[in-house]
Image (tube, grey):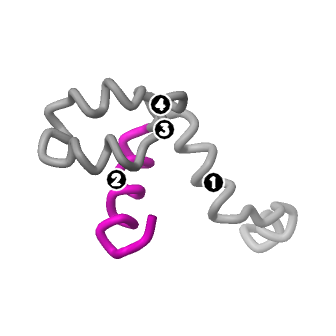
Amino acid sequence: MAKAIREMVEPVAREDVKKVITSKLPQFTKVQLVKSQKYYHRRDALNALLKNDKEYSFVQVDEILNKFDKGGK
């Protein structure tokens, strides 16, 4: 039975799932994130990396900061 169900379900790309989950998370502006206690120690990096006209979830900000820390932008 389980095998038959698996055959009927179309596979979904991991990135597509990530986009849906991320889109349902709370979003914050650059100003809100820079002023937040959560990112107090990363204010300079956030000012340089985030765009003024975009909103970000904590997951997105953490990914941006991790990429930056590893030498990417």
Going by the numbered disc 3, the residue's amino acid type is Lys
Judge whether 1 appears above or below 39 on screen.
below
Mostly what secondary structure, the magenta segment?
helix
- Position of 52 relative to 11 (above/below): above
Question: How would you rate the neighbour count of disc 2 (Cα within 10 Å): few for under 14, some for 14-19, many for 20 or more?
Answer: few
Q: CA distance from mark 4 to mark 1?
A: 26 Å
User: In terms of secondary structure, where does tag 1 sit?
Assistant: helix
The Cα atoms of the two marked residues, 1 and 3, are separated by: 24 Å
Q: Quadrant of residue 34?
A: top left
Q: CA distance from mark 3 to mark 4?
A: 4 Å
Q: Earlier in the sequence, mark 2 or mark 4?
A: 4
Find disc 4 in the rendering and name its residue: 52
Expressed as whole percent of the image width and height from the top left, the position of residue 8 reads 87, 63
Closer to the N terminus: mark 4 or mark 1? 1
Disc 2 and disc 3 in contact, CB within 8 angstroms: no
Q: Which residue is mark 2?
A: 62
Q: Give the image location of residue 36, x and y in percent.
A: 21, 29
For disc 4, the neighbor class at 10 Å (few under 14, some 14 to 19, many from 20) is few
Q: CA distance from mark 2 to mark 3?
A: 15 Å
Q: Which residue is pictured at 45% across the width and 64% down the height?
A: 73
Quadrant location, the N terminus: bottom right
Three-letter amino acid code at the position of disc 2: Asp
> Is 17 situated above or below 23?
below
Tag 2's secondary structure?
helix
Mark 1 or mark 3: which comes first in sequence? 1
Q: Nearer the viewer, mark 2 or mark 4?
A: 4
Determine crowd level at label 1: few under 14, some 14-19, many 20+ residues with C-alpha closer than 10 A.
Answer: few
Asked whether residue 65 is drawn in magenta, I would say yes
Neighbours of disc 3 within 10 Å: few (<14), some (14-19), many (20+): few
Camera-side mark, 2 or 1: 2
* CB-based contact (under 8 Å), mark 4 and mark 1: no
Secondary structure beneath dot 4 equals loop
